[in-house]
Image: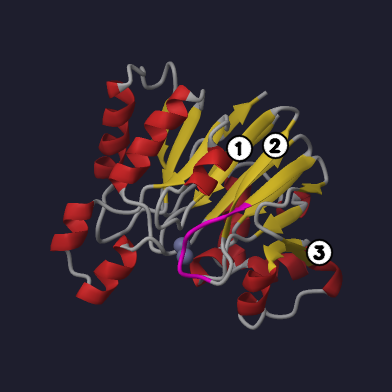
Amino acid sequence: MVELCSLFSGSSGNASFVKAGNTNILVDCGESGAHMEEALKKIGVAPDALDCIFITHEHTDHIKGAGILSRRYNLPIYATVGTWQSMISKIGKVASDNIRYIKGGVPFGAFDAIVTPFETPHDSCESVGFTIEHNGRKASVATDIGVMNKTVYENIKHSDIVLLESNHDVDMLLKGPYSPELKRRVRSSLGHLSNDDCALTCAHLLEQGVKHILLGHLSLDNNTPSVAYNATEEALVMKGARIGHDITLEVASRYTPSAKYTVR
Ligand SMILES: [Zn+2]
Ligand SMILES: [Zn+2]
């Protein structure tokens, strides 16, 4: 059984709760400790029931509360060597037992979960996304990806539940307030995934049997929840999907938890 619920999603902070069997996991921990605890309580998870934290990369919107929760609840943090090197000075002291190293493309076991971190194209040190499996069910988190490449797609394609980045509408970005340099960064192959690229990917995931799609990491300036939703909805409907019957689609909110998706 796997379960996924987005707690926060966007450039202000990212965190998802994933349950695999009896294992309670946070993927990213990008809000303050107090906000993380509040969000977990909202979805009925006691913070001291958490088992571990996985970190995708060192950007502040993914790590802000990681050290705090690790110290408060004695939680191991799993991240790549590159992520640890660039994050360690920002999250405060972590007990040496709780420093766990992982590597893109190398699966590992965490309690009940079988986890595969996969490399993501992003302007950070050694970023990864995660697939988390239990008993043949699979949930994936893939945000902060400049392009949908083969590595990311091959890893997430047989998921039951996917949280996928739908960062920006290209027109809104081009006409929006960002500097030319920042526009180039967001659009680059090491930046963030556009609504169109996300929609195209979701159409392929539909054919692979995905049941629940959450769109996440929306830009505040270059996207809106309805623009993001409509882009992917259109791509799914074009493939003949009935939203809410064949597949569910939700935009993960910046500040409040999403629905909890469970596949047994
Ligand atoms: Zn981010
Ligand atoms: Zn990032």
Query: Which numbered circle lies on residue 74?
Result: 3
Amino acid type for the residue under numbered disc 1: Ala
Looking at the picture, tell me which residue is in the foreground, 198 or 33.
Answer: 198
Q: Is mark 3 within 8 Å of ligand 1?
A: no
Residue 207 placed where, x, y %? 45, 23
Residue 121 placed where, x, y %? 48, 59
- 118 relative to 183, above or below: above
SS under mark 3:
loop
Say whether disc 1 or disc 3 marks the residue closer to the N-terminus: 3
Quick one: label 3, few (<14), some, or many (20+) residues within 10 Å?
some
Say whether disc 2 or disc 3 marks the residue closer to the N-terminus: 3
- 4 relative to 147, above or below: above
In magenta segment, residue 119? yes
Residue stretch rendered in magenta on the structure: 118-124
Query: Which numbered circle lies on residue 133?
Result: 2
Principal SS element in the magenta part? loop
- 114 relative to 176, above or below: above
Q: Are marks 1 and 3 in contact (CB under 8 Å)?
A: no
Looking at the picture, tell me which residue is in the foreground, 23 or 256.
Answer: 23
In space, the residues marked 2 and 3 are separated at their CA atoms by 23 Å
Residue shown at 45% from the left, 53% from the top: 9
Quick one: label 2, few (<14), some, or many (20+) residues within 10 Å?
many
Write down the quadrant of residue 196 in the picture. top left
Image quarter in which the N terminus is found: top right
Amino acid type for the residue under numbered disc 3: Asn
**Left or right: residue 54 compared with residue 151:** right
**Left or right: residue 183 compared with residue 58:** left
Is residue 237 in view? yes
Image quarter in which the C terminus is found: top right
